[in-house]
Image: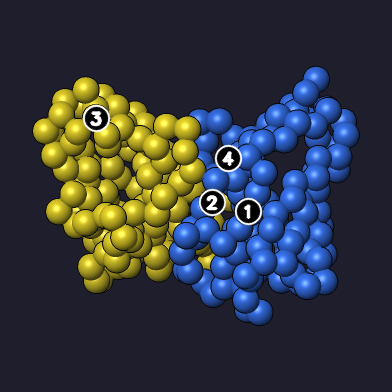
Chain colours: A yellow, B blue
Amino acid sequence: SAVISQKPSRDICQRGTSLTIQCQVDSQVTMMFWYRQQPGQSLTLIATANQGSEATYESGFVIDKFPISRPNLTFSTLTVSNMSPEDSSIYLCSVEHTGRVGYTFGSGTRLTVV
Amino acid sequence: DAKTTQPPSMDCAEGRAANLPCNHSTISGNEYVYWYRQIHSQGPQYIIHGLKNNETNEMASLIITEDRKSSTLILPHATLRDTAVYYCIVRVGNRDDKIIFGKGTRLHILP
């Protein structure tokens, strides 16, 4: 079955610092999606990452805070910049694999900002 | 905003059928109904989807009303491992269309 690897799985960071989360997919995909899940809440889409173009951000999310890279068809990174405790969440990436129904999600990165 | 409405929580006895309802009264003719679930500390997992016909796979059955304004996900013989948050989502079936999650239903399977 399709595999998504997310790193790190968890981290505790100081406020004001930045963390880059990596998402590696085992096959080429067109779009990669980044979500945030705040404690006890549902998933909120941050942005869509398309290889070769700038990411498309959802309302309430900006590139300066959540810069995204998409250097090739199997990899993407999400950076959470200038972190505050309000950024403490689980961050997940997701893709739709060719030949597979439905989206596949990574296991997430649990971020705690202190 | 999510286009679906689900009860926030439900209980079901182990071994019984779990029936999870979803209202999607504003669904468009080209939108599918998808169901995902999220077990604690994991990413969401695809379960099933349908357009207007009832669907069944190894995990669940999906019943869509004739007017398509609501649907029901059925887990025929619930086990403790089915305890999760279940999300009903409507989206156009084009590849790479984004998924917008609602609040979902937290299903508790009781031993």
- Indicate which disc residue B5 carries: 1
Q: Decide: marks 1, 3 in contact (CB < 8 A)?
A: no
- Secondary structure at badge 2 equals loop
Q: Please give the chain letter of the residue carrying mark 2.
A: B
Same-chain check, marks 2 and 4: yes
The x and y percentages for residue B96 are 47, 68
Q: Decide: marks 3, 4 in contact (CB < 8 A)?
A: no
Reading the image, the residue beneath label 4 is B38
**Residue drawn at 41 percent across, 41 percent down:** A37
Graded by Cα atoms within 10 Å as few (under 14), some (14 to 19) or many (20 or more), the crowding at tag 4 reads: some
The quarter of the picture where residue B16 lies is top right
Q: Left or right of A89: which side holds A82?
A: left
Of the pair A65 and A71, the residue shown nearer to us: A65
Reading the image, the residue beneath label 2 is B102
Graded by Cα atoms within 10 Å as few (under 14), some (14 to 19) or many (20 or more), the crowding at tag 3 reads: some
Graded by Cα atoms within 10 Å as few (under 14), some (14 to 19) or many (20 or more), the crowding at tag 1 reads: some
Outermost residue toward the right? B16
- Indicate which disc residue A85 carries: 3
- Secondary structure at badge 4 equals strand
Sequence order check, earlier mark of 2 and 4: 4
Graded by Cα atoms within 10 Å as few (under 14), some (14 to 19) or many (20 or more), the crowding at tag 2 reads: many
Q: Quadrant of the C terminus of chain A?
A: top left
Sequence order check, earlier mark of 4 and 1: 1
Same-chain check, marks 1 and 3: no
